[in-house]
Image (spheres, helix red, strand yellow):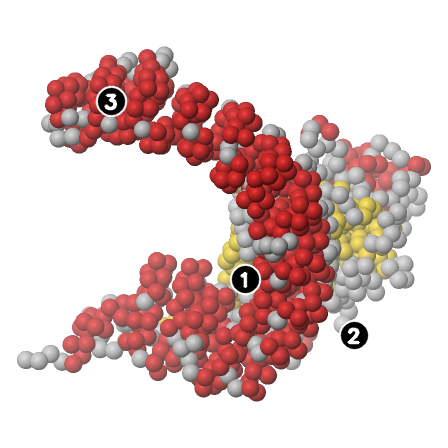
Amino acid sequence: MSKMAGADGDDSLYPIAVLIDELRNEDVQLRLNSIKKLSTIALALGVERTRTELLPFLTDTIYDEDEVLLALAEQLGSFTVQCVFFFFVNLEYLDKAVESLRKISHEHSPEDLEAHFEPLVKRLASGDWFTSRTSACGLFSVCYPRVSKSTKSEIRQHFRTLCSDDTPMVRRAAASKLGEFAKVLELEYVKSDLIPLFAALASDEQDSVRLLAVEACVSIAQLLPQEDLEKLVMPTLRQATEDKSWRVRYMVADKFSELQKAVGPEITENDLVPSFQNLLKDCEAEVRAAAANKVKEFCENLPADSRETIIMNSILPCVKELVSDTNQHVKSALASVIMGLSTILGKDNTIEHLLPLFLAQLKDECPEVRLNIISNLDCVNEVIGIRQLSQSLLPAIVELAEDAKWRVRLAIIEYMPLLAGQLGMEFFDEKLNSLCMAWLVDHVYAIREAATCNLMKLVERFGASWAQSTIVPKVLGMASDPNYLHRMTTLFCISALSEACGQEITTKQMLPIVLKMSEDQVANVRFNVAKSLQKIGPVLENSALQAEVRPVLEKLATDQDMDVKYFAQEAMTGMYLF
Amino acid sequence: IPPEGIHLLQQQHTDIISTVEFNHTGELLATGDKGGRVVIFQREQESKNQPHRRGEYNVYSTFQSHEPEFDYLKSLEIEEKINKIRWLPQQNAAYFLLSTNDKTVKLWKVSERGRRPEGYNLKDDDGRIRDPSTITMLRVPVLQPMDLMVEATPRRVFSNAHTYHINSISVNSDYETYMSADDLRINLWNLEITNRSFNIVDIKPANMEELTEVITAAEFHPNQCNTFVYSSSKGTIRLCDMRAAALCDKHSKFFEEPEDPSNRSFFSEIISSISDVKFSHSGRYMMTRDYLTVKVWDLNMESRPLETYQVHDYLRSKLCSLYENDCIFDKFECVWNGSDSVIMTGSYNNFFRMFDRNTKRDVTLEASRENSKPRAILKPRKVCVGGKRRKDEISVDSLDFSKKILHSAWHPSENIIAVAATNNLYIFQDKVN
């Protein structure tokens, strides 16, 4: 007998019914789960019921937790524009909802945009609450391109109104979308409509609005033809570089490379170079630091024919001042980019002008400055070779390696493999080897651990025979250190190095030491023996495993200490030695 | 003109009220108390049926804002007492406010819910579980009206930024940032970001033994987004410009009244400590409160205040005993009326004082249950300093120093004031014409 239509429908309806009910479950996770499956629910209900029943119900969900609202806003991408409007009046996550709307806008035909999307935008732009007006700002650029001429004119008018809105939030939203809107406008309107708005926002009384106009400056400059820049953009930009608020000047410094590319070489030479100098000499350290960060990029992008002159005459003098700036963040920012100048200036200029600066920063009292120099040595190596620096480099490295703050010591350890590669095996053995050994017995565990890892990387770089002659003896020597933490470090090193060192060294030199330590007085050492054996097991020959490792593990398995027994048994199981 | 109040509402709190603040429209009034609770009152809409109930304030929402905490590192209790509440401008149908205790600032959202969903798929209307095989169609819940419910939810928690006790919070006119000030530092926050704040003032000396001055109050200028002031325990006010530098340790303006040598005493410095500073609505003036006076300053003149008003000068001869009972350290607040023509501040014995800046008249009123019946007009009070005491005057020695009015607020546009007298909140309004 055939089932009733309703009964057939059960199987497909039931899960949806559950989802719908769980939209209001007390458990947040269940609500979240249902929201994420909103499109499934909508599909089952059909377009009409979704619009007339589901969405009105969901407006109540605005009282929900953050995560649920966010998930809801994300789901809006699958709904038509009409439905979406329900949420705008109350949602706090308008920016997420706006994102969704922007994504679906190109799925709409131009007719749809005119009929539904644009009216929505219009309603938002004239909304009572400023949150709806701010969200309108995000939607202008997505609907403008494909609507009719008269609608375009309306949209431009709305934007104009919002740029002079009473509340700073709306003006900020307008300023932040100015660039994006400019990109979709016809050039004549950019010049006639947008430029005055841009100038007005750049002179707004609120600092937060003015600094957003700086960002817009880049986009607008990119759109306009070169001959219009001087008249339409440069006055505003000049004003921004001399703004009373350091935050606006900071923004200019931060965007300087983009500005440079947008205005082109001539304006750069005439205007931006002096501006850059001023930013490098700014009274506020944050601004100087932001500008210092851009030194390399700025220099790289100068026109090739005048590059060297500009750098030598205008930029380098300022850079020299920054090397002895009072603020450590400024010096640190400079240190991270200054090395890059050597490739631009070439060998002779580097030796004469840059080298003294590098050396000065290598001796700076602030560890971060020194670290930033050391981490960028490869640039210099290409041009003049590190040997020139090595005399000063070594004291700097040693000082960092012994810094009182462990995080500084950790940072230099992490550069060690890189330095070793650049300085070469001989230099390393002579000067840096003892440092690496000293770190193995540092007071701080994180350092000992990093030092172990460091050794492993060095062995990978320099090879097993180097390891055998230089570091293995020292590591194994620690096995009889009175401090049990150092004896354990030996075991950790052996675990880390066995693979790189190979079977012979591991079996002939390392294994005996490990096995001997199975009789250590301290239980921690003994159970780490078991763990080490398990780690180096794969490197050993089977005969060694059976003849030497197994008996020791069997003995440890009967140890008095519970942890030793446990790890011994684990090791045996892990190596199939039972 | 100082209102001769009609007593609108008297609300008993369970705890000592520690802060009072109207929102930007005056529709809502928030109070915070020592128990970490916030109570919000809403003004009743004028209605034709009940014209005599014009503008009464009724309880709109009550919630627990802060709980007592324990700082394990320093073995210190962190009180849940609400030190300050500041409203954010309204952005949608919900209301937002910042409330702070000694260490943590919280952003609260207060919203109304008037409907609830009804109708389940898996349960029938009586709540019984339905047999899955009987489900033949999907049912979407329908929103039905219900009694109005007001919910308060914490939206942001700004913590771990203050070593010392927070005394002030102030929202910037850019509506994006706010500041919080403790004894030695002022931090700038973005309302959206809770895990980061910027330090903009730091007066902590390298050697704490050299500490001589602490920050007592701070406020942003009402319309200049880059300007703020902070007051100190030494009676000075510094005005800072955030545009000039990231760290505003160097002030742009320094306001201090030169000391009157004839008035110098052991207590001079203590009573010069400023307990509150408030910009006028116009942004042209600011007002400071120290122990005995209220001063109005012109922002353009640093050398001395424009106007000085004596709040309770009769206490000058009593400073010794006020020091003994700690009253000399009481922190009184001061408020402007909407047009900046009248200023108000509290005193002892549940007295509060109003000064009309234009007519130079002043009045002393009392907020107490015995003397206030609903719709009664408040009688001006007078303190007798010495000699013959008239019938309705009160002598200085009879003042009750345990009854102090530290916190009050003035409606942004109308002549309605809220006065906190220990556990009681009084709301007064001037006579309706």
**SS category of the residue bearing label 3:** helix
* Residue that carries the numbered disc 3 in the rendered image: A505
How busy is the neighbourhood of tag 3: few (under 14 within 10 Å), some, or many (20 plus)?
many
- Under circle 1, the secondary element is strand
**Do the residues at discs 3 and 1 belong to one chain?**
no
Between label 3 and label 2, give the one nearer the viewer: 3
Q: How many numbered markers are drawn?
A: 3
Q: Amino acid at mark 1?
A: Val
Please state, as top left, top right, bottom left or bottom right, where the N terminus of chain A lies in the image.
Answer: bottom left
Q: Quadrant of residue A428?
A: top left
Give the labeled residue for mark 1.
B110
Q: Between label 2 and label 1, give the one nearer the viewer.
A: 1
Labels 3, 2: one chain: no
Q: Is residue A523 left or right of residue B420?
A: left
Residues at circles 3 and 1 in contact by the CB criterion of under 8 Å: no
Q: Judge whether A201 appears above or below A342 on screen.
A: below
Query: Which label number is shown at residue B433?
Result: 2
Residue at the spot 61% in from the left edge and 40% down from the top edge: A349
Residue type beneath disc 2: Asn
Of all chains, the one bearing label 3 is: A
The residues tagged by marks 3 and 2 sit, at their Cα atoms, a distance apart of 103 Å
